């Protein structure tokens, strides 16, 4: 019985190790200037050290810009006598198969009825050694049109969530459109007010690869 328990323990440990090794990177929390309001990711254990350095430099640039925005918001709050809030956060959305997707969110309150949250995506293909933008995936007009149609149809079927009068031309897919990798495609992340009311938040719409891959050669 003891031998069986020992085997199971070793098997579990080995399985856990394999799972961890399948991850593209280890992602941990960092605080800029030890400020709880400025959290950002630090990546390590990336297969290519040069990519690890490149990714971390990108996030260092991001958090420095966030710090400037925080200080400017505080300055305006003092000048015009309104309460301010600022908070950065992030979420690892995909971390396998040599790909990494991290979403950052910057919440800013500058008086008024409510604050606003801006989402930015950081997608990397470690094997190819580059950051991936939406326009690197949707490289042809036919692909952009196919995905726009998919988003519009998805939204019009849910008028209780999205703008009921949303038009196809209201859906803008550009290099800066936030997204993240999934096992079978990508998921688009829209900014507040972009295709839905504020109360609906940042809407995420999964796009199966077949939607845009079938238009890859057009």
Image (tube, rainbow, N blue to C red):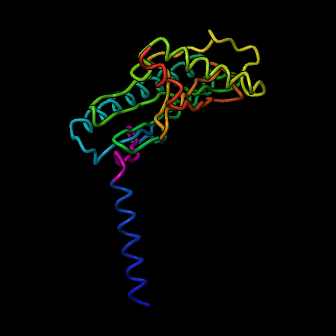
Which residue is at 52% across, 34% downward?
87
Q: Which residue lies most toward the bottom here?
A: 1
Quadrant hosting residue 35? top left
Residue 110 position within the rendered picture, expressed as x and y whole percent measured from the top left: 60, 23
Which residue is depicted at the point 33% across and 29% down?
Answer: 58
At which x and y percent is residue 28?
39, 47
Q: Tell me if 16 is positioned left or right of 55 in this view.
A: right
Across and down, in percent, residue 80 comes to 60, 16
What residue lies at 71% left-to-right and 23% top-to-bottom? Answer: 162
Specify the quadrant that holds the N terminus.
Answer: bottom left
Q: Quadrant of the C terminus?
A: top left
**Residue sitting at the far top:** 169
- The image quadrant that residue 82 belongs to is top right
On whether residue 29 falls in the magenta region, the answer is: yes
Query: Position of 203 compared to 135: left or right?
Result: right
Report the number of numbered marks: 0
Q: Is residue 184 magenta?
A: no
Indicate the position of residue 70 as horizontal and vertical percent values.
48, 27
The residues colored magenta run 22-33
Front one among 196 and 10 = 10
Q: Nearer the viewer, residue 58 or 185?
A: 185
Q: Residue at x 75, y 13 (%)?
A: 165
Residue 171 figure quarter: top right
In this rendering, position of residue 6 left or right of residue 147? left
């Amino acid at each position: 019985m003891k031998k069986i328990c020992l085997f199971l323990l070793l098997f579990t440990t080995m399985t856990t190790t394999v799972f961890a090794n399948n991850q593209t990177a280890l992602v941990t929390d960092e605080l800029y200037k030890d400020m709880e309001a400025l959290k950002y990711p630090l990546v390590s254990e990336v297969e290519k050290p040069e990519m690890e350095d490149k990714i971390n430099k990108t996030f260092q640039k991001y958090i420095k810009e966030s710090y400037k925005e925080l200080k400017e918001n505080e300055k305006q709050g003092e000048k015009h006598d309104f309460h301010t809030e600022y908070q950065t956060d992030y979420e690892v959305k995909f971390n396998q198969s040599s790909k990494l997707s991290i979403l950052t969110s910057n919440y800013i309150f500058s008086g008024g009825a409510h604050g606003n949250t801006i989402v930015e995506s950081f997608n990397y293909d470690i094997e190819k050694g580059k950051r991936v933008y939406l326009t690197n995936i949707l490289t042809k007009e036919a692909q952009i049109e196919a995905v726009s149609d998919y988003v519009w149809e998805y939204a019009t079927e849910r008028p209780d969530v999205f703008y009921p009068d949303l038009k196809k031309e209201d859906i803008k897919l550009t290099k800066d459109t936030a997204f993240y990798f999934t096992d079978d495609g990508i998921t688009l992340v829209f900014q507040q007010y972009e295709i839905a009311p504020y109360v609906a938040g940042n809407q995420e719409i999964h796009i199966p690869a077949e939607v845009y891959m079938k238009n890859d050669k057009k």
